[in-house]
Image (cartoon, rainbow, N blue to C red):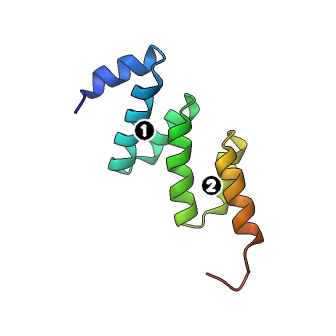
Amino acid sequence: MHDYDTLRALADEGNETALDRLADLADTRGDLAALSDLLDEGSEHAGRLLTRRAVANRDLRELQRLSDAGSSEAETELERLLRADPSSP
């Protein structure tokens, strides 16, 4: 396992893989604030992880926020959920 500080330093230097690993660590911890921060830093992986959580929770507002932040996956999932049969859970 890589040291968090090393991953952070590499991510700060523009290393996308390190940024992805930071997102994985935040996801494992359930740290949504850290995932949101990583999304703000441009981590598409953090956006995918947040989208997955929002879909599981059927959180349409969160999907809209993620879509507004540029996540095409969140936009697709939001549209899918909005078009779903209203009688389904």
User: Between residues 2 and 66, which one lies in front from this camera angle?
Assistant: 2
Q: Amino acid at mark 2?
A: Glu
In the figure, 68 relative to 87: above or below? Answer: above
From the viewer's perspective, tell me whether residue 79 is left or right of residue 33.
right
Residue situated furthest bottom in the rendering: 87
Please count the marks in the image.
2
**Disc 1 to disc 2, how far (Cα)?**
18 Å
Give amino acid for label 1.
Answer: Ala
Residue at figure coordinates x 71%, y 51% from the top left:
75
Q: Is residue 58 above or below residue 22?
A: below
Q: Mark 1 sits on what residue?
A: 23
Residue extending furthest toward the top: 13
Q: Nearer the viewer, mark 1 or mark 2?
A: 1
Q: Quadrant of the N terminus?
A: top left
Mark closest to the chain's N terminus, 1 or 2: 1
Residue 81: x and y in percent read 69, 67
Q: Position of residue 83 (x, y in %)?
A: 77, 70
Residue lying at 61% horizontally and 81% vertically, measured from the top left: 89
Q: Secondary structure at mark 2?
A: helix
Q: Residue 19 at x, y = what percent?
A: 44, 29
In the displayed structure, does residue 33 sit left or right of residue 4?
Answer: right
Residue linked to disc 2: 62
Residue 48, how many percent across, how many down? Answer: 54, 46
Q: What secondary structure is marked by label 1?
A: helix
The residue lying furthest to the front in this view is 17
The disc placed on residue 38 is none
